[in-house]
Image: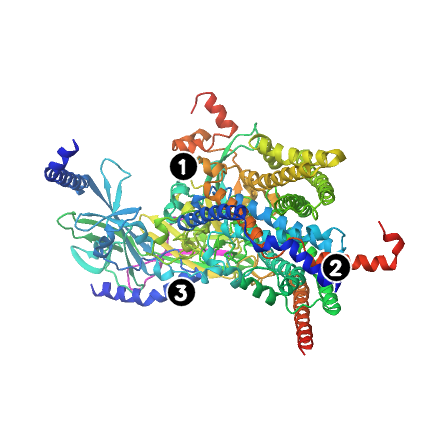
Amino acid sequence: MKSNLMKHTFYASFIAILLFSNLGFAQQEEQKEEFDVRKYKTVYKFNSFKQSDNSRLLEVSFIVQNKKDRKDKIPVFEAEIYFYNVLNDEELLLGTAFTSKEGIAKLTLPSSQNYELDEDGFINLTARFIGSKGLKSAKKSLAVKDLHLELNLKEIDSVKTVIVKAYTLTLDSLQTKVPLEEADITIFVKGMLSNMPIKEGSIEDGVFEFEFPTNIPGDGDGDVTVIANIEDHDEFGNVAQEKFINWGSHKITPVKKVKNTLWSESAPLWMYIVLSILLLGVWANYIYTIFNLFKIKKEGKSINLATEE
Amino acid sequence: MTRCIMKNNKNEKSSTDRRKFLKLGLLSSVTAVAGTSLISNLTSEETSTSKEKIRLLTPDGKMVEVDAENVNKYPEAHITPSESRKGIPDRKFVMVIDLAKCKNARKCVEGCQKAHDLDYNEEFMKVQLIQDNPEASPYWLPKPCFHCDEPPCVTVCPTGATFKRDDNIVLVDNDRCIGCKFCVTSCPYSARQFNWGHKDKFKDTSQPYSPETSVPAAEGTVMKCDFCPDMLRQGKLPHCAQSCPMGVIYFGDKNEDIVTNGDETVRFSELIKDRGGYRHLEHLGTKPNVYYLPAVNRQFPLERGFNVDEDIIERYKDVPYVQQLKKDGKI
Amino acid sequence: MDIDKRKRELVKEFSPALENYSLKTKIWIGCLVAIILVGFYAFLVQLINGHIVTGMRDNVVWGIYIINFIFFVGISYSGAFISGILHFFKTPWKNSVSRIVELITVLSLIIGPIFILLCIGRLDRLHYLFLYPRIQSPITWDIIAIMTDLVGCFIYLYLTFIPDFAILRDNKELKVAKWQKKAYRILALNYQDTTEQRERLHKITRTMSVMIIVLAIVAYTVLAWIFSLTLQPGWNSTIFAPYFIIAGLYSGVGVIIISMYAIRKYFHLERYIRKVHFIAAGIVLLVMSLLFGYFTFSEYFARWFSHKENDVHLLDTLFNRYFWEFIFANYIGVLVPIVILFFKKFRTIKSITFAAIIAVLGLWLNRFLIVVPTLETPYLPIQDTRAEFVNYSATWVEYSLSLTGIAAFCLLFTLLIKFVPIIPMSGIIDYERDQKKYNKRQPKKAVK
């Protein structure tokens, strides 16, 4: 058998190569087959956030989802999204942004941005992906009204009170304030990792008011950032307002120099003292001993010299 | 288009600021992704031998696989070993684990392993099955490092390789560790692991070593759960808390008195007060910073937790309850 | 010149041991070197592949390396203790055993710390101990204590060697290599045995003998603290320091008896190392075995009686998985020596040596039972499917290196007694001189 194989090494290796290359080919084929963009449907979401500095964040989430396996989602990366302000078929480009690795494209428009409004006072916005050979174009539009959210933090009769006011402005040149009729609102306190809701309620006739809890610690200086947020409203989209104030219930005393403990970098003082005394005592004795040995050596030398003489 | 370019410029300018912010851990929770890396850059590293891949779709409708680490990397925020000795200012981190919600899904373990480049059996977070007494109902106990306020491991370290920071976190600097293993024997919670032999992953040079990420690990040194300070500096939850589907793990700052599990944000003190929070083996006096909420009014029957690998079930064979289950032929 | 004559006599008596290597010695040395070479190979294996080649894993992170470390340092400590006492109180029979004891002290103190080095994951970073020291760590204390102790023991050993070096230097008839003679000359430090020199040497030897007793106690206490200062159920015990000291003495006296026996046999020193010495050492061993048994009983009894959950778990492990080891270490290892040494008629040289061997083996196992089962029963149960992570079993690398430790100890001992006489000649002369003075002063009483 062995010699037979040896004889046919050439053929054997040839077959082997053929086999492996085939296999590799098959694998490649398989991989190619594995992904087919047609099996996926596009999930394309568009949202508007009015932020506390009155800027507006436009956000598109662009992912594809397997039609059969809903858990199989792939974000679209580096797709250029065009954001438009639309008024009667006319599209004004506001800007473009690329999607991130999470499939999210963000465009922030400054508060000074001028929008074209329709007769009802809505800003019509469109986010568009142009599309390519492999990926179909996508488009989503939304209409939001510009809502003004005012957050006032006041001490009324020494009661810390949060007052939220919400209104829109009329379209005429007078720009009179029209109080918001009704909307759900949540008030948060800003945290390091996330914001903690402290009150949920609804704005009625443009106002929402409540007593600020007395036991919110706040940050190191006792500062609390209060956030008022209207989420996903039909007319206004997402609107948020925030303000910070020194209402924290306890102020953290700055960390003094860390006490020397067993687990700190430096040991308690007495440990250094005891160890030094012990070591000093022992090593002093060693030195004394060695000193005496030198003396013995010297004495011996003088005796040696004496006997030689 | 011009706006877009301007935006990029702005990003570049702010990148040094961003680095500073990250080091201070002050970056607000809304983090715009600053990277302008192109797909070509990402795909060129596609051939590199890495375990964890994420899939992305290009605008051309092609799917590319990218190293997960490559995506999560924030090189501009690298915290050197000496920088990592200072905590994030004014923070006192705590973790609260709600035992009533845990069903041993092991997603915390896997998320942690992925992030810290750990092997199958290397677990910073362990899920144990504890039965306090024969009558007691057993419960799943996710067990990270407790980041004690009086940590015995730090006390006994002869070189200061493991240290306690002002923000409550206990870290290991594996550049400093001499591998005497004294900390392993002195930890009453068995939270520490030792790298006994060579592994290829130790040579990973794709990112510089930081005690805050514990990556790459080094042979002959100790490692353990680090509370993911690299994530905290970005305003994100630690990997275990992030990957738990049940919201078992709450994490936050005790100074702020706020903890969150990603879905729900609550007052730490109220949570502990209302739900009878406790610390494990309190009598040892180590003052852990991980709190547990007792496993009362469970959301899932315990048996749900046996829906895991055979060899993981095998771990719990000494628990009386499991022995009973085996006797009854239920597993 | 009575003394000079006596010196020559003594050199003549002991010179055969120094002058020639018999075939037996050569074979013995060859065997030891072979064991050491295997150990060296094992060390290389461990260095190249990492600690994965040992049986130690995440739960039992300390294995027989640490056990050997405690064991050897314990022997050294007890050697220092006994030698210090022999010198300080000018015990009449110190001459027969003091050099054996001193050699054991220094050699085991050299071998012991090597085992702790084997246990360290990153030997390349050893200097970090001095670069970034933390005074709170018991390991730091231990390093300081052992280094100080080692230096102290070296100085002490050297002090006891000086007069003998001088005698060997002055003897022209000794047939040894040139380098050896030169070494004697340098090491003898011009010591001429004048009254002044002798008194000075005696004075510093006496202070050093006290010093090394203290050091030995401190060093071994610190070693016990490495265990007892942790929170682990089997280790966190207030009596650990004295317990370790008694245990160290117990094993140390055992090793001394075994060496006395071997040396007596090998060098035919029946004249010097006599049955009296064995019986005296045997009685010390008896006292130690009683004390050791008492401490062991107190330790386990308190755990059993108070039965805290984790202690019960530990005791369960000891009485099940480690049943025979426990019986041998804490019953046989204590009771057999007690029975042999308690009854006068059982006290023969051979039986005393046998008791010593049992004591030493039992004590090694006792150390094993202190270290390993505790690590196998932590507060939180070990839930792991990998057998090697649950229970410890040493690998060939660890056994080989342990044997190397013993072999290196024997080899160094053999080589050193080729260099200096095993019985201190100067001690004999001093003794005889004192005896003479004593006789002159009280002639009637001193006559035997």
Within the image, what quadrant is residue A263 found in? bottom right
Q: CA distance from mark 3 to mark 2?
A: 77 Å
A177 in magenta: yes
Magenta range: A161-184
Q: Which mark is residue B105?
A: 1
A71 vs C259, left or right, is: left
Q: CA distance from mark 1 to mark 2?
A: 80 Å
- Asked whether the beta carbons under mark 3 and mark 2 sit within 8 Å of each other, the answer is no
The residue identified by callout 2 is C430
- Asked whether the beta carbons under mark 1 and mark 2 sit within 8 Å of each other, the answer is no
Camera-nearest residue between C289 and C29: C29
The mark closer to the camera, 1 or 2, is 2
Inspect the image, locate mark 3, and give the three-letter code of the amino acid beneath it. Answer: Lys
Specify the subunit that label 2 lies on.
Answer: C
Assign a secondary structure to mark 1. Answer: loop
Q: Can I make out residue B224 in this image?
A: no
A140 vs C227, left or right, is: left
The mark closer to the camera, 3 or 2, is 2
The residue identified by callout 3 is B20
- Tally of numbered tags: 3
Residue extending farthest to the right is: C444
Q: CA distance from mark 1 to mark 3?
A: 37 Å
Q: Main secondary structure of the magenta part?
A: strand
Instruction: Say which quadrant the C terminus of chain B sits in.
Output: top left
Residue extending farthest to the top is: B328
Specify the subunit that label 1 lies on.
Answer: B
Within the image, what quadrant is residue C190 found in? bottom right
Instruction: Say which quadrant the N terminus of chain B sits in.
Output: bottom left
B257 vs C296, left or right, is: left
From what the image shows, is residue B59 above or below residue A38? below
Inspect the image, locate mark 2, and give the three-letter code of the amino acid beneath it. Answer: Asp
Coordinates of residue C340 in the picture (x, y in percent) = 71, 34
